[in-house]
Amino acid sequence: MLGLLSERDVIVVSLLLVFSYALSNYKSIQLVFHPDRYHGNQVSNGIFFEGWYYKLVLNEYENTIVAIPGVSMNDDKRFSFIMIAYNNNSHYFRFPYETFSSIEEQFLATVDNEKNIFSYEKLIVNLQPNDEDDASESFQMNLTLSSHLSIPDLSVIAPATMGPFTWIPTMQCYHHVLSMKYDIQGSIQIDQNEKLSVTGIGYLEKDWGYSFPSLWIWGQANQWENLPSTSSASLFFSFASIPWHFNIKFPGFLIVFEYNHQFYRFNSYLQSIINNLSVNNETNQLSFTVYDVLFQHKLHISTYCDESEYVSSALLYGPRNGGMEKFVHEILGRNIYFDVRLSKLIQNETLNGDSDDPFVQHGYYEEILFQERAVSIALEITGDVNWLTEELRKTYENVYPWNFSLIRSLIQYYKLIITSNQVSNGIFFEGWYYKLVLNEYENTIVAIPGVSMNDDKRFAFIMVAYNNNSHYFRFPYDTFSSTEEQFLATVDNEKNIFSYEKLIVNLQPNDEDDASESFQMNLTLSSHLSIPDLSVIAPATMGPFTWIPTMQCYHHVLSMKYDIQGSIQIDQDEKISVTGIGYLEKDWGYSFPSLWIWGQANQWENLPSTSSASLFFSFASIPWHFNIKFPGFLIVFEYNHQFYRFNSYLQSIINDLSVNNETNQLSFTVYDVLFQHKLHVSTYCDESEYVSSALLYGPRNGGMEKFVHEILGRNIYFDVRLSKLIQNETLNRDSDDPFIQHGYYEEILFQERAVNIALEITGDVNWLIEALRKTYENVYPWNFSLIRSLIQYYKLIITSIISVTIIWLFLVKFR
């Protein structure tokens, strides 16, 4: 039936499916773009809260007033509330949930059967304390709110204040600023005091979810000591511990500063950079500096309070443990201020490595755009915020700001870096790895051309590894060239040429080179065996990770196997005509990982010449944002031009990874997520024979360092076995083998010993072993059989949906 469809029909069906999904989730999607509206109508059970925060700074009152209407739900335990904070006290009024109402088309909420009304335009409050309320005063307010200053959305992908996180349906707490500033006019009466006509300035935000974070810092200001009335400025900031799946948590922050209606955003999802966050809960001292990722602007904020004056706070209720608890300390602007400075950062060519200021070191100076003291502020510091301070310090010191200037280039030019031509500054490396196993030479030869950059310190290099030695030749960066249309790189003004088709090398060691031999190679490369892309979403060797612009190191296999023909001369030896088999890959980024295991083989002891097999594997510690790291692996085995992929991004499963650095013993088993295939790889080396390695240069600490030990196939082998897993109905719980327990048996497809292998084991790989063991034992393989079922039947499900849609269209057309 699908074959009868025209291209137009396929497009129509696809659009109908998208439309059907959008229609069925219309209300949820609508709330993403209108977070000011009430979300609780979508909640039928479970824990949920929602509250709107009105801050009112009135000319007629010395103290700031805060009004917070909201709802709290814990299954059938539901109620609405209004909380008023005033004069360092909070007053908490509870109402039956049924007395709360809202409309879907706009932000308008009422409490106590419309006696209390909250919207953008109106704030009407009529509150009398009852016995069950935690309140001691009555409040009547009738206020008109106008001239709202809202933060514009960045994009459809990053709407509202939380940007892309707004789309994630499992966040603990969502936050949105409705109005950075608005004008107030109306009347207020507190308790038995006289009713007063009031004017002032306000701020409006909201939170919703299932709980406040375990710790956070929050601040807001929109009034200033000496700002001219013709100017406008407002500030909001929030730091919090963000819980995630698998018991992971990370620090997040949202910071927006508005000056004369221009918005400066410094958010963690925009890769902004926090430096020197300092907090003292006892004295309420707070200080931090934040930079946007492009280092175009810098915002510094610090609190100021006279030590002789007491700074008090109101204790507010907040959502925690499935209900509302009184634990939030909020300071409302008495005797405490924010000193705020916004600067434009300008880079010149004058670097000063002796300065203590990292920006001066890297050639920046500041142009101050705004410097003022904020009054009538609001500030909350809750929980052990030392964790936040420490995590943001680690992020700044270990990742930012100079090691990751590559990110700034990516964002600045909106391009994924593929070649070094697109890197204008920062730390970057790129290198191509040619492995040459030649019939005329006993030892494998490796040739690696590349470039290394650290801002203006740039150079090209060629490294040759042979006979357990490495030879490292450096060249001026200007002598390196490449073409954009295809892979073709040259070094030393085209004396050395590297491509898919050619490898031409003419190298003579100079005094500044770490090399003791000369090399001349003129090789023709042909019959490349490349790994096909999985899809547009998962291209190249790293699949979907290729799209992520902030990886430490990218890896791609260009050719699993190719034929070699040509000539080689090493030092003063005779020039020899050679033939052989090769392997080609590349790496690029800003540094090699801190630890990794890598191996490759494409020649076999007893494989018939009519068959083909090749293997590549790589395990590494992958650093991520917020000082998180996780184990990743890429494993591809090719047998007779069929590719078996076992990658972490495909949810493949590693079992029994075992490594001994001293003896170079390595062993692991990997399964695809559907348990259709199993690959076992182990090293074999005779203990009586010495296994030596060459010490190679690699990218680390912003340069090239000699620290990579590579074994190139002398007296060491890989034993490789590929099996097909077949499930029957016979379960055996008494067996030690989990697959026999779950009714599997093996059919061996390939079993051979690889020769002329390459192997690298670098760093403390025990962390990798332990992390993968935990993953196998705690998550895989049996607890996650749901994933296997979903993947196994997704084609059937999609096909069924398309078929039903086609039948429906046919019936509609001809009935």
Image (cartoon, rainbow, N blue to C red):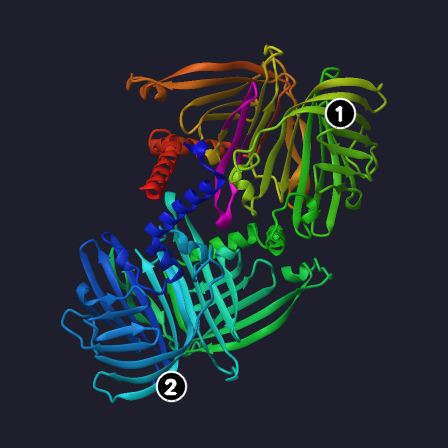
Q: Position of residue 4 (x, y in %)?
A: 44, 33
> 292 or 683, which lies in front?
292
What kind of residue is marked 1? Thr
Residue 282 shows in the view: no
Which residue is rendered at x = 49% and y = 42% of the image? Answer: 629
**On the rendered structure, is 773 left or right of 596?**
left
What kind of residue is marked 2? Asn
Q: Which quarter of the picture shows residue 125?
A: bottom left
Q: Position of residue 471 (x, y in %)?
A: 75, 31
Q: Which residue is mark 1?
A: 524
Query: Among all residues in the image, which is located at the extreme front?
Result: 814
Q: Which badge, 1 or 2, is on the more N-terminal residue?
A: 2
Which secondary structure dominates the residues rendered in magenta? strand
Residue stretch rendered in magenta on the structure: 618-645
> 656 or 160, which lies in front?
160
Which residue is rendered at x = 83% and y = 24% of the image? Answer: 571
**On the rendered structure, is 694 left or right of 571?**
left
**SS of the residue at dot 1?**
strand
Which residue is rendered at x = 59% and y = 36% of the image? Answer: 555
